[in-house]
Structure formats: structure tokens, C-alpha cells
């Protein structure tokens, strides 16, 4: 008896291996997958501007990076004793004006360099709902806890999202024709918008994304949203907030992604990396014991062997 509906995903090309250059952008789910790649020591850049929830924020970020724009004092503001930028997540917000500008512009530069060398760009879309700053008539990436009356909440239409995604892909390809763009929809439900409103939002993202993927050869779609909605239809796969997928769900989706996109040859290296990572995390009862000193010596040799093959890997 089969008590679960399973999603079938065909293997994709080009495969990701340890020579690949990866850029991951978008919602917090992009960071979940990005953390996996970072753990296994791939050449990865994840959300230099922090979490970007909606397609317009991602498009703006890619435009600023690929056009070699820079942020200046006129692009940031002071609120609640910190400097912020409406195009970036609050995790970049700083006590100092110069510090924030340095973070923003360094992020743009790092992103441009990564796009130029990227083999794969993964974009995770979280919501179609956006907030428009009424004083500047500008859709923001983050409101930074400014008064709600300053903003107007809007739902991006399918056509508007489609245009954002097409622009984003074109900006990437203008710098690197060989990059593969992988879209996915975040399985995180934005319940604060409302249950019906969240479903409307996800449906707009799904419709627009599939139109873009079907029309641009360099684009592909990975069904992380569908895996959670159809295979993991149980609250035991959610965190304590009953909204975010928990570690089990993230590991489950990661296994699907690995099977779909990562080369089998790289799996062997991943096993070696994981062995070292677990060794580093090990805490002995007696750090001066002969057994533990031999364990550390063996661990260092395993690091050396791996770094001889991949010089960019550090622990």
C-alpha cells in the first residue's frame, strides 16, 4: 500500500560539481539550500543583500549589480538608531552610514563577479505581495519596521511577475550566456498575508514562473513547493511556527535537489567533506587522550588530501 503521492523529477543538465560556481538568491528557502552547499564546501554565494522575498526586489538587485551601479548617501536612511536601505534586508542594516554603504556596494561587486563565472543561478520566489513606499512611489524589498501608513500593499499580477523574471534572466545572461537559471517557489507560507491571500500569491508566482521557464531555454524549474505540498502533507514536517519547513523537510528536499542537479561524482567528495565536518564537530571526553590526538591527526590528513584536490576548500 502506497500512503504517499510521489513527485517524479527528471535529472537535469548541466550537473553541479565541485568546479561549479553557484549563486543563490531569494527567500529564506534559498538560504536553506545555500547552507547545504556551503556545508559541503561548494563555491557558493548566497543572498548578498539578505533575504529578498519577491520578484521585483530580485530584479532590482540584479539590475544594480549587472549595471555596476553604486549606492550613495541618498539611497539610505536612518530609522530606529540604524541606517537602512529599502533594497536590502535588515540584516545588512548598520549603526554607521559608511559601514552600510560598504556592505551594499561590496555585495553588488561580489554578485557581479559571481554572475560572470556562475554555472548555476538559483532563484527562489517567496511571495507576490509587495509594499510600495508612497512618498517615492517605489516598491521596496524590506520595510525595516517603518510605519505601515507609509506603504501601500499590492499584489503583483502574473504579467508583472513574468516581466520581472524575464528581466532578471536577461540581466544574468547579459553577463554570462552559459549560466543555467533554476527557479523554485518557496514552500514557506506567508500566513500573515492571510490564507487565501497566500494561495493567490503562490498561484501568481507559479503561473508566471512556468511561462518564463517554458519560453527561455536557459531556465529550469525545481518543484520544492510541490514536494512540500504533495509529499510532505503533514505538520510533523514543519517547524514550531507551523509555517516553515523543519530540518527533516529541508533535508528531504535537498536530497531531491541533489539527485536532480548534483553529479554522482560529486557525491563521493560530499561524503568526504561530511566526514570531516562531523569530525570537526566531535567533542571528546578527554582532549588530551592518545586516542583523540590520533583522531585529530587523521582528520588533518583527510583535510590535506581533500585540499590537494580542491584548493578552494577550507574548514
Image (cartoon, rainbow, N blue to C red):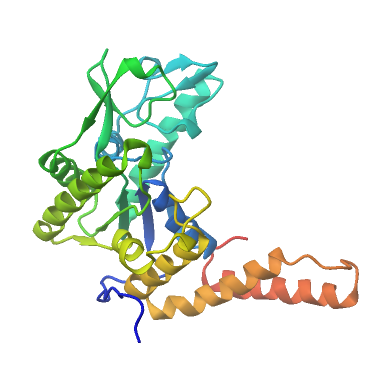
Residue 223 at what x, y percent from top left? 28, 63
Residue at the image point whose x is 41% and y is 31% from the top: 105
Find residue 294 and report its image quarter: bottom right
Residue at the image point whose x is 42% and y is 47% from the top: 28
Q: Is residue 129 visible?
A: yes
**With respect to residue 59, does 274 lie above or below?**
below
All told, the count of numbered labels is: 0
Q: Quadrant of the N terminus?
A: bottom left
Name, please, the residue furthest toward the bottom: 1
Q: Quadrant of the C terminus?
A: bottom right
Q: Is residue 72 left or right of residue 304?
A: left
Quick one: 192 or 24, which is closer to the camera?
192
Quick one: 311 or 283, which is closer to the camera?
283
Residue 170 at what x, y percent from top left? 17, 46
Q: Is residue 133 left or right of residue 192?
A: left
Q: Is residue 16 visible?
A: no
Quick one: 146 or 83, which is closer to the camera?
146
Residue at the image point whose x is 24% and y is 40% from the top: 128
Find residue 233 and report its image quarter: bottom left
Residue 287 at what x, y percent from top left? 87, 66
**With respect to residue 88, does 84 lie above or below?**
above
Residue 182 at what x, y percent from top left? 27, 58
Q: Is residue 209 left or right of residue 98?
A: left
Name, please, the residue furthest toward the top: 135
Q: Is residue 134 left or right of residue 101?
A: left
Amino acid at each position: 500500500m502506497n500512503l504517499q503521492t510521489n513527485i517524479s523529477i527528471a535529472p537535469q543538465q548541466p550537473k553541479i560539481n565541485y568546479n561549479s560556481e553557484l549563486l543563490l538568491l531569494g527567500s529564506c528557502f534559498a538560504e536553506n539550500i545555500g547552507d547545504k552547499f556551503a556545508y559541503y564546501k561548494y563555491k557558493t554565494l548566497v543572498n548578498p543583500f539578505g533575504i529578498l522575498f519577491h520578484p521585483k526586489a530580485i530584479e532590482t538587485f540584479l539590475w544594480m549589480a549587472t549595471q555596476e551601479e553604486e549606492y550613495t548617501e541618498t539611497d539610505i536612511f536612518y530609522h530606529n538608531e540604524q541606517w537602512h536601505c529599502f533594497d536590502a534586508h535588515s540584516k545588512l542594516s548598520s549603526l554607521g552610514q559608511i559601514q552600510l554603504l560598504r556592505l551594499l556596494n561590496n555585495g553588488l561587486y561580489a554578485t557581479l563577479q559571481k554572475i560572470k563565472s556562475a554555472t548555476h543561478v538559483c532563484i527562489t520566489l517567496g511571495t507576490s505581495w509587495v509594499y510600495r513606499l508612497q512618498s517615492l512611489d517605489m516598491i521596496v524589498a524590506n520595510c525595516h519596521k517603518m510605519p505601515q501608513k507609509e506603504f501601500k500593499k499590492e499584489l503583483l499580477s502574473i504579467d508583472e511577475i513574468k516581466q520581472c523574471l524575464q528581466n532578471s534572466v536577461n540581466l544574468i545572461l547579459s553577463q554570462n550566456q552559459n549560466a543555467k537559471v533554476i527557479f523554485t517557489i518557496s514552500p514557506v507560507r506567508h500566513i500573515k498575508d492571510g490564507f487565501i491571500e497566500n494561495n493567490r500569491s503562490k498561484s501568481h508566482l507559479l503561473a508566471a514562473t512556468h511561462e518564463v521557464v517554458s519560453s527561455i531555454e536557459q531556465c529550469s524549474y525545481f518543484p520544492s513547493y510541490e514536494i512540500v505540498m504533495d509529499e510532505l502533507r503533514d505538520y510533523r514536517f514543519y517547524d514550531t511556527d507551523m509555517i516553515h519547513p523543519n530540518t527533516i523537510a529541508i533535508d528531504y528536499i535537498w536530497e531531491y535537489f541533489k539527485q536532480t542537479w548534483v553529479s554522482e561524482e560529486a557525491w563521493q567528495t560530499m561524503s568526504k567533506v561530511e566526514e570531516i565536518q562531523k569530525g570537526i564537530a566531535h567533542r571528546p571526553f578527554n582532549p588530551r587522550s592518545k586516542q583523540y590526538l590520533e583522531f585529530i591527526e587523521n582528520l588533518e590528513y583527510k583535510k590535506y588530501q581533500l585540499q590537494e584536490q580542491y584548493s578552494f576548500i577550507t574548514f
